[in-house]
Image (cartoon, rainbow, N blue to C red):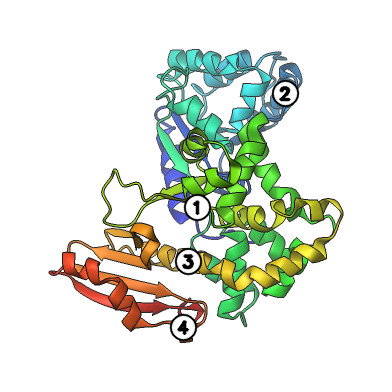
Amino acid sequence: MKFYNRNKELQLLHDWEELSAEAAQMTIVIGRRRVGKTTLIKKAFENKKMIYFFCTKKNEVLLCEEFVAIAKDILGTDILEYRNFRDLFRYLMRISTEQNFTLVIDEFQEFYYINPAIYSEMQNVWDEMKDHAKINLVLCGSIYSLMKRIFENSREPLFQRADHRIVLRPFTVDVIKDIIRDHFPSFTPEDLLAFYTVTGGVARYIELLIKSKAFTKEKILDTIFSENSFFLEEGKNVLIEEFGKDYTVYFSILSLIASSKTSRPEIEGELGVSVGPQLKTLEEDFNVITRTSPIFSKPNTRQIRYYIDDNFLNFWFRFIYKYRSAVEISNLGFIRQVVERDYNTYIGRILEKYFRDQLILSKEWSAIGSYWENGNKNEIDIVAVDEFNKRMVIGEVKHNPNEINLGTLEYKAKNIAASHKKYTIEYKGFSPDDM
């Protein structure tokens, strides 16, 4: 797959690399697995002197042997054997006083499992030598909770050491549309919706569907539910390290959220236990769920819903994890039938998310959200507010455009209109035809 978009991130990485010629720079790049962090970094520095280290769970001595060989090849100098990363890092910092280069350490959080003392050792070397070094240090990681702890916890040695930070997110809806147009020019809105529903803009998933020439709903589902499909274990592979030994509890909660049990009372009613701490952890530490409340509600509102923001993980928990017993006996046809049966209902919220993302990209709005009243009454899919120009779009999203009823929508929004009399309000329907 060719390189798409990421122009803003590329420019930032180029700018910071140029700064490193005068003074050492430390950048952290964070993003979920498969989102394209490594591809971005290699693209950014493809014509620069770059040493690229990839951390894997192996003995520190063996890892240093591998790193020394890589550094020797790039720097073109003889390097002594180093048996610990502290001494190798000190050597590279010293070399950078004589020549400017980029050092990338990918999957940086893996040092936590190899030798957690490496972080304090790096901090000591960095603080001691950075004023004279000309190194562009890029630290990349995909386990959100660990990267957050390493750099944002005040008790950790690398707290506040990074000069720059990039959080790499999946491709936006306009880029997803460009990608499918490049590879399948005859795509329909339904094709785009299915492509977005499953990939959510995650680069690796898009690449796999392109390789399989899977651009329609039928072919996408064929790819996902084929024997030995990459996608069947992917949700577990992405999250198991993040969650650790408690993963079954978190997986149960996520499966319920993906199945439309989105409030804490609903989740606790299904599981029979309190899940407040787990919901807080999933939101704040793991960044897997999003807590939402009605737009215009007060900060202390109890009308809270939780959603999985990642499209693929939502799909995986709704259909694959939920029916994992069918996966274990290789009855993938059964799950495929369930998806076909529930698809039109399932994509309702995905379609809402698509249009919210589209409105976000327009940069016209000061707030975008959904609306509902006590008892889940008068639910409205989209409310976009332009506080500066006193205007508002109130939207209803339907898979079938014939089901859009603007009169009913206006009635449900009567309390919003009454409390925003100075606003110009547009009532609008959204369907796949508007994608």
Q: Residue at x 68, y 58 (%)?
A: 319
Mark 1 and mark 3 lie on one chain; the one further toward the N terminus is: 1
Query: Pointers 1 and 3 in contact (CB under 8 A)?
Result: no
- Give the Cα distance between marks 1 and 3: 19 Å
Distance (Cα) linking label 2 and label 1:
44 Å
Q: Secondary structure at mark 1?
A: loop
Asked if residue 210 lies left or right of residue 25, the reply is right
Mark 1 or mark 4, which is nearer the start of the sequence? 1
Residue holding disc 1? 262
Q: Nearer the viewer, mark 4 or mark 2?
A: 4
Disc 2 marks a residue whose amino acid type is Leu
Q: Amino acid at mark 4?
A: Glu
Q: Are marks 2 and 3 in contact (CB under 8 Å)?
A: no
In the rendered image, residue 56, in percent from the top left (x then y), is placed at: 71, 30
The dot on residue 403 is 4
Taking 140 as reference, is 389 above or below it? below
Mark toward the viewer: 3 or 4? 4
Q: Bin the neighbour count of mark 3 within 10 Å (Cα to Cα): few under 14, some 14-19, many 20 and up.
A: some
The quadrant in which the N terminus is found is: bottom right
SS type, badge 4: helix
> Hey, which residue is sitting farthest bottom in the picture?
402
Q: Which residue is mark 2?
A: 63
